[in-house]
Amino acid sequence: MGRGLAVVTGASSGIGAATARLLAGDGREVVLVARRRERLEELAGEIAAAGGTAHVEPLDASDGDAVLDMAERVLRQLGTPHAIVNSAGAGEWRWIEDTPPADMGQMMGAPFGAAYNTTHAFMRAMLDAGRGVIVHVGSPASLAPWPSAVAYTASRWALRGMHEALCQDLAGTGVHSCHVVFSEVSSEYFEANPGSHEHIPKVGSTLLRTLTPERCAEVIRDTIARPRREVVHPVEMRALAWTNQVATPLVRTLARVTGRRRPQSE
Ligand SMILES: NC(=O)c1ccc[n+]([C@@H]2O[C@H](COP(=O)([O-])OP(=O)(O)OC[C@H]3O[C@@H](n4cnc5c(N)ncnc54)[C@H](OP(=O)(O)O)[C@@H]3O)[C@@H](O)[C@H]2O)c1
């Protein structure tokens, strides 16, 4: 097993970039995965200047063959990762009638497809090693959906579904699957996915604080060190998730009535 090796998808921006930077600062060798090569090279340069080691793997993680090729290179040259952070994700929040099937396919491609492909590609080696942690960066939408984000939400439920199924399969193997849910994060997400931010339901924007990618990275680092099935952050997000568990209709109604209305009814 590559000592302390971490593969981070979505490493060109936001939560993934901050996590890769933090893990590299801790002395882990990191593999940076995303589509934008120049962003990854910039981050790798920054990590190297700080005395760390980063390898860039520019690819579309929704492409299963590209991920398998990347994993083959990593396993051959660097060894088996100790940690995988599945943070690649995108998707505009839209009504289903405004989301053609091709766009839905792209949204399912990342985060869900990207996380599936990456987890699949390294799983046999991690099982053989008998240890490892896979962190999936999820969304509050996977706990309590709000209006006008159907394909986005479906991809996050698929991610959470994969994680829950993995937990069953991985019991007793030494490999852990962890689902991490954050409230809003001050990353480039809403610039990269325009028209989404105004769809946040008021119950979320009023009750939940906005996190920095750096704070999310600390939570992910802590999850790798102390794997848990589900990590919800910050505390008020945890309170909302707990309320959702014990009073689902209440949270469902709050998300709906404080959420986006169809344009014709505005
Ligand atoms: N921002 C929030 O408020 C928030 C809150 C909770 C959860 N999340 C979730 O956290 C995840 C990361 O979001 P973020 O805030 O870090 O957003 P971000 O700053 O936009 O970063 C998204 C990352 O995913 C990469 N990516 C997207 N599609 C990809 C693909 N097909 N293949 C490889 N890489 C891909 C992007 O890089 P390239 O474009 O270079 O490929 C980028 O590095 C998302 O799934 C998001 O839903 C975000």
Image: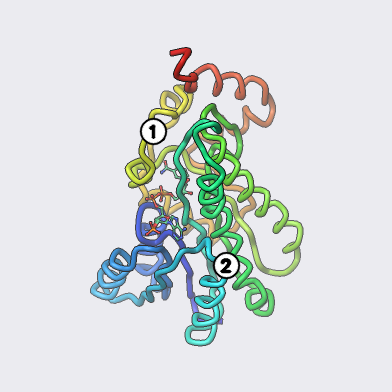
Give how far across and how far down residue 134 sits, in percent: 58, 62
| Residue at x-position 33% and y-position 68% | 37
Nearer to me, 183 or 74: 74
Helix, strand, or loop for circle 2?
A: helix
Image height check: is 224 above or below 210?
A: below
Is residue 189 found left or right of 236 in the rendered image? left
> What amino acid type is highlighted by mark number 2?
Gly
Q: Quadrant of residue 227?
A: bottom right
Q: Are marks 2 and 1 in contact (CB under 8 Å)?
A: no
The residue that disc 1 covers is 197
Of the 4 image quadrants, the one containing the N terminus is bottom right
Give how far across and how far down residue 12 sits, in percent: 35, 60
Is residue 6 found left or right of 187 in the rendered image? right
> What amino acid type is highlighted by mark number 1?
His
Rendering colour mode = rainbow
Give how far across and how far down residue 226 sits, in percent: 57, 59
| Residue at x-position 48% and y-position 70% | 6
| Residue at x-position 54% and y-position 60% | 114
Q: Quadrant of residue 211?
A: top left
Helix, strand, or loop for circle 1?
A: helix
Mark found first going from the N terminus, 2 or 1:
2
Report, in whole angstroms, how far the alpha carbon at label 2 lies from the one at label 1. Answer: 30 Å
Give how far across and how far down residue 93 sits, in percent: 47, 36
* Residue farthest toward the bottom in the current orientation of the protein: 76
Task: Report how many numbered discs are placed on residues in the image.
Answer: 2
| Residue at x-position 53% and y-position 16% | 257
Is residue 14 found left or right of 172 in the rendered image? left
Of the 4 image quadrants, the one containing the C terminus is top left
Check residue 64 in the rendering and tell me which mark sits there, or answer none. 2
